[in-house]
Amino acid sequence: MDKKIIFHHDDLISDDGIIVNTGVHNDDLISDDGINVNIDVNNNETIKENEQDKKIKSLLYSSKVTCPVCDNVFDAATVKSSAYRSTKKDSDFFIRYSLINPYFYDVWVCDSCGYAAMKSDFNTLRKIEIDQVYKRITPKWRGRTYPEIYDVHIAIERYKLSLLNYVVINASSSKKAINCLKLAWMYRLLETDSAKEMELKYLNQALEGLSKAYYVEDFPLYGMDKYSIMYLIGELSRRTGHAEDSLIWFSSVITTPTVKESLKRLARDMKDLIKVTDPIDTKVPDESKKTKKSGFISKLFKR
């Protein structure tokens, strides 16, 4: 029986109990029409904010995008390539930016039919996937209006809309995994205890999806070759508490002659952070022997 997808501004709920929380709450100061509401600020703060908004808007441009599901043409906010200013790169490849964050604008959402995907995947739908969006997303889509400038909360909502679409169309494990990884990165930016829990949850899902993709999908995956994926699986294993698995993946990267020295160095650095007392097997873990988790989120990668 098909799941009925019910769209609300706060949660996306299916009739079998699946809840995809959008992460937009009253205290995020988002009104019903998606416009940021600013309250209790003095004039100086307002002036500074307006100046910063103007600067951010100057770094954006509007792209005309045709939806592959309904042929609706909509405007997609896009960050100018010249505006990218990275300040730091985390060990799981998350790039931190100053002033404007390109990750906030990485998901395109059709306001007509509800189709959403990361922009690199947006136009890659097959006929059967288009039919699934029409059947299970569009009938329940209410539409959503967003401000010109996106913040982390809006980014989280849009990544979750994208993830919902990937689940509905039964997208590849790598697509759902990278979507989950970027969701984890967005929660990392919030730096709260509850956000850290959500970050860990989505890191675990990214790990599960990439581990499956490693064995069944062709490389490169999202611009990453086989060895970059091996490293990333090792690093996600480390961050989610799977130290022994992490050491196995890192060792495989380090001992492979054709791996770039910069990636080997990164694997060595992360390996040095791990302290274990048990002897470690040097073979890449057998994905088929891993214990499967229960619950909706763990079902993302079951096909």
Image (cartoon, grey):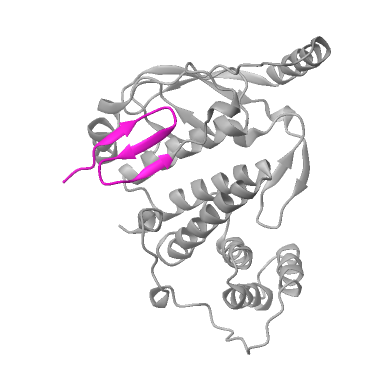
> Is 302 placed left or right of 228 in the picture?
left
Q: Is residue 201 left or right of residue 99?
A: left
Question: Residue sitting at 35 percent across and 28 percent down?
Answer: 68
> Would you place residue 134 above or below residue 238 in this image?
above
Residue 223 visible in the displayed image? no
When asked about the image quadrant of residue 26, the answer is: top right
Q: Is residue 51 above or below residue 210?
A: above
Residue 160 spot, x, y in % from top left: 46, 39
Residue 208 seen from this side: yes
Expressed as whole percent of the image width and height from the top left, the position of residue 259 reads 67, 68
**Residue interval drawn in magenta:** 1-20
On screen, residue 63 versus residue 175, left or right, reads right
Q: Residue at x 59, y 48 (%)?
A: 194
Residue 16 is inside the magenta segment? yes
Q: Nearer the viewer, residue 165 or 25?
A: 25
Q: Identify which residue, 199 or 194, lies in the foreground.
A: 194
Name the residue at the right extreme.
Answer: 44
Rendered-image quadrant of the C terminus: bottom left
Q: Is residue 132 magenta?
A: no
Residue 42, position in %: x, y? 79, 13
